Image (cartoon, rainbow, N blue to C red):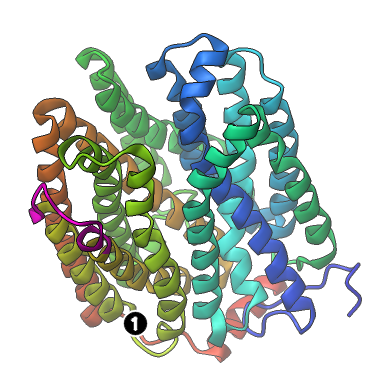
């Protein structure tokens, strides 16, 4: 089949080779781009605040605006992918992300930069909202685990590389180049996507605009409240955000009761494997974010390491996670996610507990093995858990499953960030040690939830059932 023509796929056989490898390269470029952009901005915040004349606290909204937009838009874009096809949503996301990156680089004020980061977040949501769902149609079903593992590996590499690469760029030029460099890479990914991504089945239903507004209000209210706690906003404002979120959530549940394909996938949460995997993801990412936020403060303030040394001491975590995610992706094709997740999260909890208990005078090697233990455990959990979420959903609901996967990650990270800020703000450096201990406890809870899937897991979906489901969908 010539590369210039989009071909239909059925969600079982994947794309033929070599077309599959070109599509994998396309998706890898987009994941690399979005993951790098998400993590590179942190190192530039002091320079942005200084150049644009804002306070350090206000500059944090450059990060928060992107993350909140990404979180609330994942589910709507996943649903748009189900209705109109994942390919056009993916292409539109790349176009928006590319143009927004160029505009962000030309920003002249913090308000302008923050607003354009919202637009950039929408573009990233278009990419990430359908990314995992697209993998389901690129890889054969038997190899989906390794595909998601490779995806996790690329995201981990980008996350690991972003801070040092960002620091290197800032040492030779200004912060706008952190965004401008996205443009050629995004343009290359867009050119590849036009010629390699397949046409996926489309659902015969309309987009639920009112449901999307309620979904955005619900998740946005929760995230704004979490950020409000972290930034010390007035209690009345945090309470209002929580009340608005709760009201939107209750109204959504009442409105969508009995709906066959709701935007927030209530239908998928009836599947034990799906809801337990989502719960595992939320709790695990909450534990991870707590640790990653407090560790720099603990290493610098309590243990006396400088900023450059702290960056190196943190590196074994994502490096070990990068390796274990590849292994875990392959293991997920032969071993249940409940078992792999349970073992991984117990290992992760052990690493966090070891970090919490280490004395103030600890050698870099002793810190490194603790970090690596956390990375190995988290990588062992993440890829199989992502596979479990995606395969628990029928092919026609891959967009909703992929959107939920990303939303669960971001909700867990937001909860972890809020708790870390609360512990640091209340107890200082002692709070960092406490946050690590709480993170270990939360990771053990996540491990317990993961092992519940060993009893609740359904029989693996057969290729015949998948073909029948896809054939029925196409016929309707």
Q: How many residues crowd mark 1 within 10 Å: few (<14), some (14–19), many (20+)?
A: few
Above or below — where is 158 with respect to 197?
above
- Counting from the top left corner in percent of width and height, residue 286 is at 27, 49
Q: Which residues are magenta?
A: 357-368
- Counting from the top left corner in percent of width and height, residue 458 is at 34, 82
Q: Label 1: which residue?
A: 458
Q: Quadrant of the C terminus?
A: bottom right
Residue 358: name its quadrant: bottom left
Q: On the rendered structure, is 172 left or right of 387? A: right
* Residue at left offset 58%, top offset 78%: 469
Above or below — where is 409 with respect to 327?
above
Q: Foreground residue, 19 or 348?
A: 348
Q: Foreground residue, 222 or 29?
A: 29
* Residue at left offset 76%, top offset 84%: 16
* Residue at left offset 76%, top offset 65%: 197
Q: Secondary structure at mark 1?
A: loop
């Amino acid at each position: 089949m010539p590369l210039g023509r989009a071909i239909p796929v059925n969600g079982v056989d994947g794309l033929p080779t070599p077309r599959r490898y070109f599509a994998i390269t396309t998706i890898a470029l987009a994941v690399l781009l979005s993951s790098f952009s998400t993590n590179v901005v942190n190192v530039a915040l002091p320079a942005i605040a200084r150049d644009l004349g804002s306070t350090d606290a206000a500059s944090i909204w450059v990060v928060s605006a992107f993350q909140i937009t990404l979180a609330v838009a994942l589910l709507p874009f996943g649903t748009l992918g189900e209705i109109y096809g994942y390919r056009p949503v993916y292409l539109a996301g790349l176009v928006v992300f590319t143009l927004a990156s160029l505009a962000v680089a030309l920003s002249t004020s913090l308000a302008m930069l923050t607003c354009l980061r919202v637009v950039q977040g929408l573009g990233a949501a278009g990419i990430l909202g359908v990314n995992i769902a697209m993998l389901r149609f690129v890889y054969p079903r038997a190899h989906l685990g390794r595909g998601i593992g490779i995806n996790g590996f690329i995201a981990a590499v980008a996350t690991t590389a972003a801070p040092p690469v960002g620091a290197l760029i800032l040492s030779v030029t200004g912060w706008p180049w952190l965004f401008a460099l996205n443009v050629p890479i995004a343009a290359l990914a867009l050119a590849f996507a036009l010629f390699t991504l397949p046409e996926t089945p489309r659902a015969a239903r309309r987009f639920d605009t009112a449901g999307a507004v309620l979904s955005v209000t619900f998740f946005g209210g929760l995230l704004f409240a979490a950020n409000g706690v972290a930034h010390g906003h007035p209690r009345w404002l945090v309470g209002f955000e929580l009340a608005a979120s709760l009201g939107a959530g209750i109204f959504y549940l009442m409105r969508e009761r009995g709906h066959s394909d709701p935007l927030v996938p209530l239908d998928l949460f009836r599947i034990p494997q799906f809801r337990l995997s989502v719960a595992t993801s939320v709790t695990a990412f909450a534990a991870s974010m707590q640790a990653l936020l407090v560790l720099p403060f603990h290493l610098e303030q309590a243990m006396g390491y400088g900023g450059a040394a702290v960056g190196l001491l943190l590196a074994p975590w994502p490096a070990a996670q990068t390796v274990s995610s590849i292994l875990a992706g392959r293991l997920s094709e032969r071993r249940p996610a409940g078992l792999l997740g349970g073992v991984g999260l117990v290992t992760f909890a052990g690493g966090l507990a070891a970090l919490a208990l280490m004395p103030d005078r600890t050698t870099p090697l002793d810190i490194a093995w603790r970090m690596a233990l956390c990375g190995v455990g988290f990588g062992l959990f993440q890829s199989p858990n992502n596979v479990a979420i995606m395969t628990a959903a029928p092919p026609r609901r891959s967009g909703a499953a992929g959107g939920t996967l990303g939303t669960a990650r971001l909700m867990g990270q937001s909860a972890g960030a809020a708790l870390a800020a609360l512990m640091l703000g209340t107890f200082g450096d002692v709070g960092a040690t406490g946050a690590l201990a709480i993170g270990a406890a939360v990771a053990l809870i996540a491990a317990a939830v993961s092992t519940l899937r060993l009893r609740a897991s359904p029989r693996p979906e057969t290729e015949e059932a998948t073909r029948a489901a896809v054939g029925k969908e196409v016929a309707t």
